[in-house]
Image: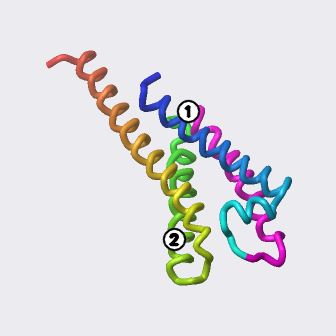
Amino acid sequence: MTLWRRAFQVVVWIGILLNWAFAVMTFVDPSRLIAALDLGEIESTVWLFNYSVLLALLSCFYIPAAADPFRYQVNAWLLIAARLIPAATFFIGVSTGFLVNGFVKLGAADSLIGIVELLLLVRLVRYDRVEAAREVTSLHPL
């Protein structure tokens, strides 16, 4: 296993565990989570519970890519999109005044993890292609 593959797996698992921790915190003490993230005054936490359930379920689809990013390439690329698209949504929501400033924290976390995953996966794919080319040239020397 290459360093790039191991690093990708570790970052994906960190993201999964953070998502699950967010969901658990929502179920255990949603008002504390809302206060910690400075998400503003909330009359009902129904949306937060729904978001957390979906986030926890979505994270389950990251596991195959964490185990084998080549076999589950679609999952690997989609998990990056599933980090960066919500991050952009949080940033846009805050900049337009639709969301409170606390959502920048969620956007920052998602974008940081997503960008690191993207860089690692691109590096991993490039490394794999170089290794495959080396194997071909070693089997068929000129």
Residue 61 is covered by the magenta coloring: yes
- Give the image location of residue 101, x and y in percent: 58, 73
Residue drawn 54% across the image and 63% down it: 87
Q: Residue at x 56, y 83 (%)?
A: 97
**Residue pictured at 49% horizontal, 29% vertical:** 6
Residue 43 magenta-highlighted: yes
Judged from the image, the secondary structure of the residue bearing numbered disc 2 is helix
Pointer 1: what residue? 68
Q: Which residues are magenta?
A: 41-68
Query: Disc 2 designates what residue?
Result: 91
User: Quarter-wise, where is residue 104 in the image?
Assistant: bottom right
Query: Pointer 2: residues within 10 angstroms few (<14), some, or many (20+)?
Result: many
Position above or below: 47 against 5 = below
Quadrant of image for the C terminus:
top left
Among the 4 quarters of the image, the one containing residue 26: bottom right
> Residue 106 vs residue 54: left or right?
left
- Specify which label sits upstream in the sequence, 2 or 1: 1
- Residue sitting at the far bottom: 97
Q: Residue furthest left?
A: 142
* Nearer to me, 37 or 54: 37
